[in-house]
Amino acid sequence: MIIGREKELQELHEAYNDGYSQFVVVYGRRRVGKTFLVREAFNYKFTFQHAGIAQAPKSTQLEEWKNSLAKYGLKVEKAPKTWFEAFSLLDDLIRKSRAKRKVIFIDELPWMDTQASNFVPALEHFWNAYASARKDVLLIVCGSATSWIVDKILHNHGGLHNRLNLKINLRQFTLHECELYAKSRKLGMQHRQLLECYMVMGGIPFYWSLLKKELSLPQNIDAIFFSEDGELNDEFDALYHSLFRKPEAYITVINTLGKKRIGMPREEIVKESGLDENGKLSTVLKDLEHCGFLRKYHQIGKVSKDAMYQLVDFYTLFYFRFIQENKHHDPCFWSKSVGSSFYNNWCGLAFERVCLAHISQIKHALSIGGVASNEYSWFVRKTEERPGAQIDLLLDRSDETINICEIKYTSYSEYMVTEEEEQKVLNRRERFLEDTQTTKAIHLTLITTRGLTHNAHADIFQNVVTAESFFE
């Protein structure tokens, strides 16, 4: 049973029911559920289905293509020698099919584009010369190597330029969708456990599918990530090697950004990572952004060249804070870490990322869902005279208002503002006004897990948003 994905399913069904041939691209991060979505959308019934093979040479790819053709009724004695010949054989299969709508699903497309294979020109020729010349073909291509999909398909300047009919960038689940999934699996988790699980795994459906209902959340995390035979104990290398053919520079950037909570500007990444300041770094940063591992953001009022890059992938942050730190390979490392200062610091960082992944829910809770806004972060470095200041989230609204969001994680109790904390918040507000010279109204907004304790200092906040809003 498929959870959520209503919009994507509707789009795929509309493409199926269109009166002309349609070219659809589905892309997104590894393990996010692209293949499952397409198969469920068409009840696992295809005129032709094929998946590329990781790190396999052209000859192996073509041999497997021949085998896939045979599964769908086209007997070929010898494997094709070129991709042009391979797609010509696919055209033969389509012509022989009696299906009213020929649904062609080619998965893991990037793996098929081996060096000097001419795969992309052959795909272009197939679509332009064969498929688009008919009215009954629905071609769906899919891949986890998001950067390849973007560069070779979405931004194609050759035969596929402006030829795509539908692009689906499949995102991770929201907390609401994770709750629906957990209920369907009878995991017995309440909102607190769901939030903590999201802070570890993000909304990656495959990761959630590994949870066992007979185990507590700490037991599940130990079993999945820290046990010797855990499904995800080597996920980090598999993740980046599956997405990028030469992952070393990407991993270097990720390692570098993992050291800085608020992120880094480009020049600092160069300095800290040792990578050269060249076009390759631009490609790496762009690819990581496309894949959802980092976000590029601007400080309010700053120019584009001052952009910051911040690591936002939940699993990767968890990897750096815990898996990488498990030096003695303790299979119960997570259970033993819960409640420690080390764990509490991570909770604050991970909760910030949950907020960034649920901006629309935050806006809805503030009753500004229909108001256009830009999301920023802001900071000023310390000087000899004054300490630094940082605001993790600003909602710069079109109705002449800015929400300065204070993000606070608490495990069990409401957040209580002390006199010292009130002064810090007010100081950040004043520094922000001085630095930006904005004339917009400022609303101090608290985003927290369990609400606000009402005391003498609590009324500094005009708005309070709780994590409960993320489940709507």
Image: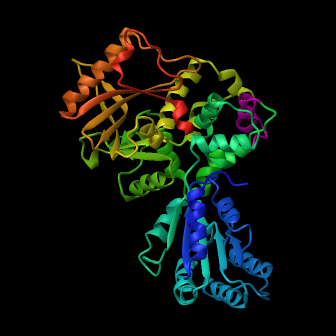
The quadrant of the picture occupied by the C terminus is top right
Judge from the rendering whether residue 256 lies leftward or rightward of residue 4; answer left or right: left
Whole-percent x and y of residue 54? 67, 64
Q: Quadrant of residue 341?
A: top right
Query: How has the structure been colored for display?
Result: rainbow
**Viewer-proximal residue among 462 and 269:** 462
Identify the residue at image location x=67%, y=30%: 190
Is-magenta flag for residue 177? no
Q: Would residue 25 be seen by someone viewing this image from the given angle?
A: yes
Judge from the rendering whether residue 282 lies leftward or rightward of residue 313; answer left or right: left
Q: Is residue 238 above or below residue 379?
A: below
Whole-percent x and y of residue 183? 71, 40
Q: Is residue 406 above or below residue 97?
A: above
Judge from the rendering whether residue 424 lies leftward or rightward of residue 215; answer left or right: left
Q: Quadrant of residue 219?
A: top right
Whole-percent x and y of residue 347? 55, 27
**Viewer-proximal residue among 254 and 199:** 199
Q: Would residue 245 be seen by someone viewing this image from the given angle?
A: no
The quadrant of the picture occupied by the N terminus is bottom right
Identify the residue at image location x=24%, y=32%: 441
Q: Quadrant of residue 67?
A: bottom right
Identify the residue at image location x=61%, y=45%: 177
State the extent of the magenta-drawn residues as a range. Answer: 216-233
Is-magenta flag for residue 232? yes
Whole-percent x and y of residue 431? 24, 25
Identify the residue at image location x=51%, y=24%: 409
Q: How many dots with numbers?
A: 0
Residue farthest to the right, as pictured: 214
